[in-house]
Structure formats: structure tokens, C-alpha cells
Image (spheres, rainbow, N blue to C red):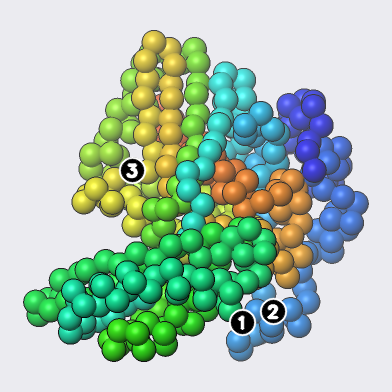
Amino acid sequence: MSLVNDAGQLFLGFSKLSRDERYERLLDLGALTTQDIDYLRQGGLTDANLAEQLIENVIGYFQLPLGVATNFCIDGRDYVIPMAVEETSIVAALSKTAKWIRQHGEITTHLSGHCIIGQLQLAKVNNFQQFAVIFDQNKQFLIEKANEDVAANMVRRGGGVMELALRRLLRPDGGDMAVIHLTMDSCDAMGANIINQVLEYLKEPIERLTNEKVTMCILSNLNDQKITTAKVTLRNIDPVLGERLQEASIFAETDPYRAATHNKGVMNGIDPVLIATGNDWRAVEAGVHAYAVRDGQYQAITRWRYQDGVLQGELNAPIIVGTVGGVTSVHPTASMCLRMMGIESANQLSRVIAAVGLVQNLGAITALCTEGIIQGHMKLHLDNLLLVAG
């Protein structure tokens, strides 16, 4: 569902409303239905039977606060962003920064590539040259068999196995390790289960054809085949602030000690949306941090530059998510959060998440470059301290 045209007006004063007033405002925005509001008023998910199906040794639920970030306009479309998170000030800073961008700039996104990656490892290959020849001769046959027998449903949805590629790695003992990369279009699924099934399926024919032993089959969370990009442009920026933000970015691009905290700030925006939509936030974290060291040194996954009153920021990262299958489909809160954003595909969700991460990053470095991180954070953190003190 898309939000109404006067979303900017309905976002005004949102943080000052009572919870019931927020429900009504989100109803007016088209982000929630009356059924959603009833569900939230009752405390959300309380069904222990569902928990028993999700994990083992269940004793209950650990509830995280579910909030919404407002003021987002991404690629010309208004969004309310659901966030499941416990850390004070994330939602407030994100909403404030999104409002700044809404008034003085824009957020745009795009995707490059469409495949996920799986790996078959052959730890010790006796004759790599011979193995490579046999692999090359049978590669297309293996792709076709996998698509016919295991990934047939994915193929019918427009995806499936796209390619197999062979890599040669030198072992510490001087021998050869072979790694076969499988690329798959998993459509709107995150794809972990189906790609692992395909890899396991290919193990036996590869061993039979090559007389070599496959030792491991597993997907990779470092996915450089599908990169999500978000861009922010802000105009009429004070030159002193613009230069400070650029220097903050250069610091994180250059120094891994700063980059770790800088990227944590990006993930402060990304992780809560992943959790709210039932996606594997650990997998995305692993992929983003591995991608951050792709050039040999850990560095920022965002880049900000200022010139002539214009600030431009960009985030590039592998953000592999799903909108079907797994917890996303069975958890009612996750389904509600996807509906709240009007998500129609996994690609759309990854673009929204990238935009949220970049906006959160801008909010964090702006605070660092102006009043400092403590002042704004501690104002909101004070309630927590008073709660602890009784």
C-alpha cells in the first residue's frame, strides 16, 4: 500500500503523540489497518505454539520495543519504517534526519546484480588441472540438472541456478584447494535453504565425475554479486558543517578503528528493520562487514562529500533479504511490518533498508560534528537511568 500524498503533514509532531494517537495517525497514513492496531494493543505475538515451531527448548518470548521512524521519502515514495530495537535515540535521530532530507534533498536507491552465492569446497584436490577440465566439460549439465531436480520451483518463479565458477586456492601445506561458486537467483526469498539444498545435491555428481572429494557445501554471506546502493543529496548546507561531515567520512574511510564504530552506526539503522521484518540480521551483518574489507583494509561502507553547498552521501553493501519463506512468512508481526512499508519484493526491501542505514549514518556523524554524540543521546537515555533508579 502507498501512503497518502500529505504524509509530510501527518508525520508532523508524531513523537509528541500518545500511543493511541500514533495508531490513529498510522491508520490515516495507510500504514496500519484496524486489525493491526488490535493486534498491537493486545501485546503482539503471545502464541507459545509458534515459538515452539521456530526454535528449540522454548520457555517464552523476549520482547523488543517496536517503533516507527517517520518522514522517509525514498525514490519519491513515502514510507513509515518499522524498527525493533532496544537502544535509545535511534528512532528519534533517524526520524529527525529523514525530515531534514525531506525538506532539503532526496533519497534514491538502486540495485546491481541479482544473485546469491553458494560454495562447494574440495579441501584437497589431487590433480587440479584434470579437475578443471572435467568441471568445465560438465558445468552446463550440472546447472541444468540442479534446476530440473531441486530448484524447479525457483525456476518457475523466474530464478534458479545461473552459473558455476571454479576457484583455485593455495593450501598452507602447498597443495590445492578447489572451491566451486554457485550463483542463484532466489527471487523474493533470502535463499539460504534452497541454495544449500542445491549445493548438497551437486556434491554426489561432482564427486562421481571427478573422483575428488567434496568436503563442505554452504552458502556465502559475502555476496558481491548483488549490491544495494542508497544515495542522499542535501542542498543549502552550511559550508562549515559540510566540510566537517566530509572530514568525518574521510576519517572512517581511512582508519579501521573509526570505521568499526562508523559502520556500527549504519547497522543501528539496518538491523532494527531486519529484525522487524523477520530477516536474518546476523547474515546481513556478516556480509556488510566482510564487504567493508574487500580492498584489504576495513573501511567505511558509506562515503560523504561536500561541494558548493551540496552534501552527497552513498552507501554500497550486500543486503540480502527475503519477503517470502522463513520467519518473514510465519511471524505475524514481521508480516505486518512488511505491509506497513508496502513492500512488494525483496529488492524493494533491500533498497529501503540501505536508505535507512545511510540516513542513520548521516544522523550519527552530524551529531558528532555538532553537539557531540552524548548530548542528544543522554537526553533520551535519562528516562532509562531513572527507570533503573526506581
Q: Is residue 142 above or below residue 232?
A: below
Is residue 345 something one can see in this rendering? Answer: yes
- Dot 2 or dot 3: first in sequence order is 2
Image x and y of residue 341, in percent: 71, 46
Image x and y of residue 255, in percent: 23, 43
Residue denoted by label 2? 51
Quadrant (top left/top right/bottom left/bottom right) for the N terminus: top right
User: Circle 3 sits in a helix, a strand or a loop, which is it?
Assistant: loop
Distance CA(mark 2)–CA(mark 3): 37 Å
Query: Which dot marks residue 280?
Result: none
Find residue 189 and report its image quarter: bottom right
Q: Are marks 1 and 2 in contact (CB under 8 Å)?
A: yes
Image x and y of residue 84, in percent: 62, 56
Q: Are marks 3 and 1 in contact (CB under 8 Å)?
A: no
Image x and y of residue 79, in percent: 69, 38
Distance CA(mark 3)–CA(mark 1): 35 Å
Distance CA(mark 1)–CA(mark 2): 6 Å
Tell whether 358 sits left or right of 190. left
- Pick whichever, 147 or 313, lies toward us: 147
- Pick whichever, 139 or 202, lies toward us: 139
The residue located at (28%, 86%) in the rendering is: 212
User: Circle 1 sits in a helix, a strand or a loop, which is it?
Assistant: loop
Q: Are marks 2 and 3 in contact (CB under 8 Å)?
A: no
- Dot 3 or dot 1: first in sequence order is 1
Tell whether 233 sits left or right of 176. right
Is residue 386 something one can see in this rendering? Answer: no
The residue located at (74%, 78%) in the rendering is: 50
The residue located at (46%, 51%) in the rendering is: 226
Residue denoted by label 3? 300
User: Circle 2 sits in a helix, a strand or a loop, which is it?
Assistant: helix
Say what amino acid the circle numbered 3 marks.
Ala
Residue denoted by label 1? 55
